Image (tube, rainbow, N blue to C red):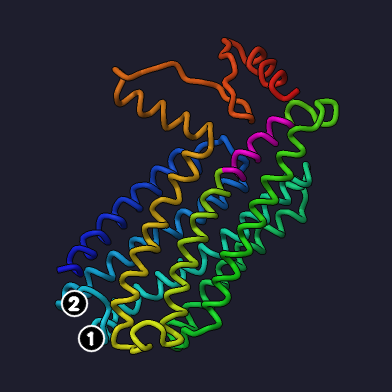
Amino acid sequence: MIWYFLLSLHFVVEIVGVLSHLIFLQLVVFRGIMDVYCRISLGMISISMIVMLVSYLVETLVCLSIGTIYEDAQCAELPLKTILLCIHRYAEAFSLAAQMFFTIERVLSIQFEHIHRSIFFKIFFIAGFLFSNFTGLAYVYTSAIKGEYGTFWLIAFQLFVIANFPFVLYAKKISTVKYKADVRTYSLKRKHNLYNSYEIARSFLYAAAIYMISQLACFGLLWAFQFGLLFDGNRAYFPRLFFVISLIWHANLTTFPWIVMLIHRSQRERIYKVWMQMFPETKSPAKILGMNGKELVATPTQNDYFDQLQQSWK
């Protein structure tokens, strides 16, 4: 009975996850409120997570078609299941590499003001995209095709997850320091860009922290099984363990876009406005918040708005 309950949770988590990422793409990636490189990076991460959720959902349906809830030896032999597994593992590795690449891109963008205009950055961005694809293809080849899913990829993925967090933390720190500099040091436009960078780094920091905790929990379970601490390392029980791990993993993917959007102040306001349009009877005045979280006085003109921002930066 418990497995049917977990199966139902899987379906709910994966369907809600896909819808959540579609909302994220619409409100964040397809809007021009962030620079183009940031939006492309976030788009790659979000789309890879959608692919993971959809491919696993279809994998589960394929296994159900032959009467099994989770992947067993019989289900694993199905050609369609193998194809879906390759797609899922490609997206899995691509997502982790893309997140690491995104945080490095953020650090460079914050540290060097005009780097987006340089040929170096374009080469770097293309190289990061190719690296993410190479990581995904290498993972598919070694794990899904050759069947050598072992300690190498467990260690590599843990390094991706753990190393990502300090990069995001550093991006938040340097954006804060630069933002708080005197207005004579940086122009108002530069400060506004730094504020956006701070908000992106801040929201991604929380998402990365929760992502890291859940991923490490999943990796911990895999390590425990690998060393015989769970089910004595009996491979017959691995499909059940992986079924539970996948539920934790996909719940993490589902919450990821909401953490980014709700922590980011302007995105939170955007979601709030959409909510108010849906339920106008609870409508209340929107607030403009400074970097310190304090409310700024809403004013009718753009010049007045930036005057208020400049006052909050002093």
Q: Amino acid at mark 2?
A: Thr
Element under disc 1: helix
Q: Nearer the viewer, mark 1 or mark 2?
A: 2
**Any mark on residue 74, and which?**
1
Question: Do residues under tags 1 and 2 come within 8 Å of each other at their CB atoms?
Answer: yes
* Residue for badge 2: 68
**Any mark on residue 144, and which?**
none
Quadrant into which the N terminus falls: bottom left
Q: Which residue lies at the image location 72% right of the left edge and 20% below the top edge?
A: 310
Q: Is residue 28 above or below residue 147?
A: above
Q: In the drawing, does residue 306 fall left or right of residue 149?
A: right
Magenta: main secondary structure: helix
Q: In the drawing, does residue 49 fall left or right of residue 103?
A: left
Q: Is residue 306 above or below residue 137?
A: above
**Magenta stretch: includes residue 10:** no
Of residues 181 and 52, the one drawn nearer to the viewer in this rendering: 181
How far separated are the C-alphas under marks 1 and 2? 9 Å
Most extreme residue toward the front, as rendered?
229
Callout 2: few (<14), some (14-19), or many (20+) C-alpha neighbours within 10 Å?
some
Quadrant of res 242: bottom left
